[in-house]
Amino acid sequence: MQVHIKYFASIREALGQGGETVDTEARTLGQLRDVLVARGGPGAQALARERVLRMALDQQLAEEDALLRPGCEVAFFPPVTGG
Amino acid sequence: MVVRPLSDASPRVRVQHGLFDVAQEVAALQAQDPRIGAICTFLGTVRDRNAPGAVGSVQTLELEHYPGMTEKSIEAMIDEAHRRFDIVGARVVHRIGVMHPTEPVVLVAVASAHRGQSFQACEFVMDYLKTQAPFWKKEQTAQGSQWVDARVSDDAALARWGIHKPNA
């Protein structure tokens, strides 16, 4: 299925892009993260399992087990620091 | 930078580059409902240094956000504040982009009939926003720029309200 991914802050900088659309067989957010890490390149480090990062699915904070849907919007970003 | 006047339909959550005027925001909140007898505001401003003992002072602070999700998440926080506290209204203004020390960053204003509920709800919304709203800060000093680290103490502040959603 097609999934729209957004990256923010330090992760956006590390990947050199604010987002991308991918075709994936991943079913969950966690699986998608693993797929992106497995591609290698800057994403391997920026999204690595040992990094603390937060995720959103369709603009709501979500956990690794959240189920992806065709056309959904996913985001990966570091811990938030607003306020 | 010019502070623009508020329109009557000014929404309760705004994310904007420009400065805001606290008195104007409070007046707009006040005008919503004659039951209001107390308005508590929190104003966050740009410090010239972040970590205690940090080397070099902050020249500029840059804030990035997730357009759409940021606004929705703060709306949900205000809804939750309405469920938990006896408040009449609330508004949040948060700036993004490049700003300088002493400038305002965020305003949370909450109105209630009496002061107790708005004091609490104001702190609640701010604790929630600090750890769950998608904003990121980057500091520029003479030594270069770096992303600001999230604080565990902010997670603890939210946990006091019975919400366990670790960020840092």
Image (cartoon, rainbow, N blue to C red):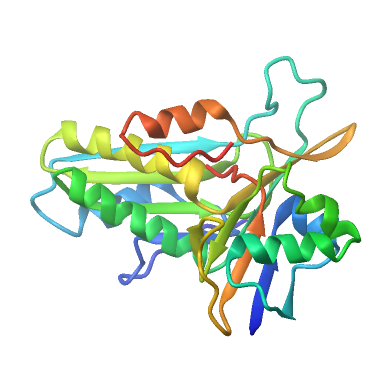
- Quarter holding the N terminus of chain A? bottom right
B107 sits left or right of A48 in the view? left
Residue lying furthest left: B35
B47 sits left or right of A45 in the view? left
Q: Position of residue A68 (x, y in %)?
A: 55, 73
Q: Nearer the viewer, residue B105 or B75?
A: B75
Residue at screen point 26% across, 47% down: B81
Q: Position of residue B135 (x, y in %)?
A: 59, 51
Q: Nearer the viewer, residue B77 or B47?
A: B77
Q: Position of residue B145 (x, y in %)?
A: 83, 40
In this view, B144 is above or below A67:
above
Residue A28 occupies quadrant:
bottom right
Query: Residue B16: in sight, yes or no?
Result: yes
Residue at screen point 27% across, 45% down: B110
Q: Position of residue B46 (x, y in %)?
A: 61, 36
Q: Nearer the viewer, residue A80 or A71?
A: A71
Query: Residue B66: in sight, yes or no?
Result: no
In this view, B162 is above or below B27:
above
Label total for image: 0
Residue at screen point 45% across, 50% down: B21
Residue at screen point 76% across, 20% down: B54
B143 sits left or right of B88 in the view? right
